Amino acid sequence: MELSEQIKNDIAENPIILYMKGTKETPMCGFSNQVVQILNHYGVEYKDVNVLEDPQIRVELSEQSGWPTIPQLFVKGKLIGGADITMEMHQSGELLDTLDVSADS
């Protein structure tokens, strides 16, 4: 399976998926760690993909999403955004509603 197809499948098959630097157990940058901490705060299950394992993941992902930076959080196949947007949504309470939608599916 081509990488672009794998990314599409992963986004479609995982209600919550985070493309990040490092893993949820060992984030390798502050922005990725920030999103991991927020998701852990809500206690949701999510798949993490380490873009550092293959630089091409980042290229393909950004081409598909139109978002240039990492991390990238997807919920129910929809790009939520990076660390700044995730933090803003968390602080406003909007992220809880978004994550609840994915938990119901």
Image (cartoon, rainbow, N blue to C red):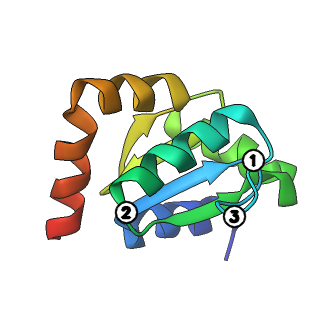
Answer with mark 2 or mark 1, whichever residue precedes in sequence: 1
Residue 70 appears in the figure: no
**Label 2 Cα crowd, 10 Å radius (few <14 / some 14-19 / many 20+):** few
Residue bearing mark 3? 25
Marks 2 and 1, Cα distance to the nearest angstrom?
20 Å
Which residue is at 62% across, 46% downward? 61
On screen, residue 80 above or below 28: above
Q: Secondary structure at mark 2?
A: loop
Residue 66 appears in the figure: yes
Residue bearing mark 1? 21
Q: Is 77 placed left or right of 93 in the picture?
A: right
Residue 7 vs residue 1, the one in the foreground:
7
**Label 1 Cα crowd, 10 Å radius (few <14 / some 14-19 / many 20+):** many
Residue 29 vs residue 14, the one in the foreground:
29
Q: Secondary structure at mark 1?
A: loop
Q: Is 83 placed left or right of 56 in the picture?
A: left
Q: Amino acid at mark 3?
A: Glu
Residue bearing mark 2? 43
Residue 49 vs residue 12, the one in the foreground:
49
